[in-house]
């Protein structure tokens, strides 16, 4: 991430300038560290056991909200959790 550009477009607050640094591909480093340990096989089995597929194309609410907001012209509604 180019921090100067991130500050310039408002992605990061300018008050943090000089207080943060980009660390590169930290997601990849974390994944390698997580999957290279002794219990990696058990971790993968757990993830597979609690994960599932959601077909958003079959979800009417998703399709309606996607079409309504795909051009970012209207303010998004607050989710009703």
Image (cartoon, grey):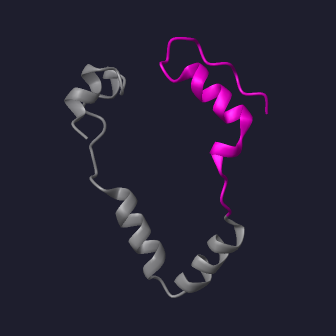
Name which residue lies at 65% across and 33% down: 63
Image quadrant of residue 78?
A: top right
Quadrant for the N terminus, please.
top left
**Viewer-side residue, 54 vs 33:** 54
**Viewer-side residue, 21 vs 62:** 62
In percent of width and height, residue 37 lies at: 47, 83
Rendered view: 20 above or below 43: above
Residue that extends furthest to the top in the rendered view of this protein: 74
Image quadrant of residue 39?
A: bottom right
In percent of width and height, residue 62 lies at: 67, 35
Name which residue lies at 64% across and 45% down: 56
Residue that extends furthest to the bottom in the rendered view of this protein: 38
Image quadrant of residue 80?
A: top right
**Viewer-side residue, 43 vs 77:** 77
Q: How many labels, in total?
A: 0
* Residue 34 left/right relative to 47: left
Q: Is-magenta flag for residue 44?
A: no
* Residue 30 left/right relative to 17: right
Image: magenta residue range: 52-81
Name which residue lies at 47% across and 19% down: 71
Rendered view: 58 above or below 74: below
In percent of width and height, residue 25 lies at: 30, 56
Residue that extends furthest to the right in the rendered view of this protein: 81
Q: Is-magenta flag for residue 65?
A: yes
In percent of width and height, residue 38 lies at: 51, 88
Quadrant for the C terminus, please.
top right
């Amino acid at each position: 991430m180019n921090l100067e550009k991130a500050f310039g477009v408002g992605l990061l607050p300018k008050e943090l300038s000089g207080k943060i640094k980009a660390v590169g591909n930290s997601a990849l480093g974390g994944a390698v560290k997580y999957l290279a340990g002794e219990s990696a096989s058990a971790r993968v089995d757990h993830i597979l056991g609690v994960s599932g597929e959601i077909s958003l194309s079959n979800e009417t609410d998703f399709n309606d909200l996607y079409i309504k907001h795909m051009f970012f012209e209207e303010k998004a509604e607050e989710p009703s959790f």
